[in-house]
Amino acid sequence: MRLATRVWGDGPRTAVLVHGIMTDSRTWRRVAPVIAGHGYRVVAVDLRGHGASGPADTYAADTYTPDAMAADLLDTLPSAPDLAVAHSLGSAVLLPAVPGLRCARAVHVDPAWLRRPRDLDALRAVKHATRQELRAAHPRWHDDDITDEQALATWDPASVDALRHLPGLPDAPAVPSLVLLAGPSERIPPAEAATLRRRGWQVRTVDGTGHTVHRDDPAGFPDGLRGWL
């Protein structure tokens, strides 16, 4: 399935961005120009069931799985990007796509790799959240980011089924890879972060941020990527 994309910059290098669940490529709008300023053409996707990509054409059992969504990345993104950045569920989608994309480096932002107890019905209900509820849930977000969560209008809540198929903690990275965590992170607790380091992943934390690191601290996010841009 070919996905809708959004582009920033026209530099000689290529960076690709993969958002998390419930949002779309607009989630990157405050940090993508900063990445582009380092000499990149930045290409961000709307995953299936999100943004302008809309729901998949078929609702087969594998419609929303990380592997099926990874195949969409291969159908859509330029091959051999210099950098791939993914957040949350997007990291579970990017993980199996990395070898096929042949990206040079990868950054996983507070990745949703570990299965944990979740009320999926409550997550689906977020589709109907009001602006006031979004502001209460995300006090550090810029007003424009709250407005951009109109992405909920086009989000297919069936996509939360992807959370039933998370990959678990990965082994050694296929390419040089950074895990950039919220501070503190609920998705990758300290013991699991230590395991990732032993397996060859670089791990950093952006202190004082919640799960959506790049929206909670759009100035601190690029600093967390120092040496990777």
Image (cartoon, grey):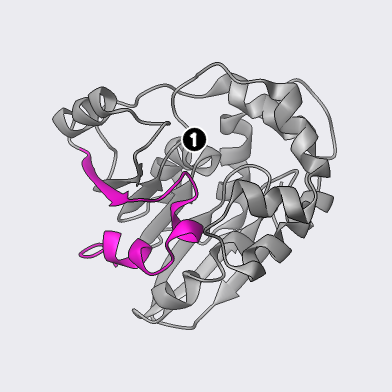
Q: Is residue 124 above or below residue 202?
A: above
- Residue 71: where, in percent of width, then height? 59, 40
Name the outermost residue toward the left: 198
Q: Residue at x 44, y 23 (%)?
A: 114
- Residue 157: where, in percent of width, then height? 78, 35
Q: How many marks?
A: 1
Taking depth in this image into account, of 128 and 72 the one nearest to the observer is 128
- Residue 219: where, in percent of width, then height? 38, 69
- Residue 220 is one of the magenta-drawn residues: yes
- Residue 67: where, in percent of width, then height? 57, 31
Taking depth in this image into account, of 33 and 129 the one nearest to the observer is 129
Residue 154 visible in the shown view? no
Q: Is residue 119 above or below residue 109?
A: above
Q: Residue at x 34, y 64 (%)?
A: 220
Q: Is residue 191 above or below residue 66?
A: above
Residue position marked by numbered label 1 in the rendering: 92
Residue 123 image-quadrant placement? top right
Question: Pointer 1: residues within 10 angstroms few (<14), some, or many (20+)?
Answer: many
Q: Residue at x 29, y 39 (%)?
A: 174
Left or right position of 107 against 140: left
Residue 214 visible in the shown view? yes
- Residue 68 is one of the magenta-drawn residues: no
Q: Find numbered disc 1 in the image and state the secondary structure of the residue it sits on.
A: helix
Taking depth in this image into account, of 158 and 150 the one nearest to the observer is 150
Q: Residue at x 54, y 38 (%)?
A: 89
- The quadrant of the picture occupied by the C terminus is bottom left
- Give the magenta range: 201-229
Left or right position of 206 against 52: left
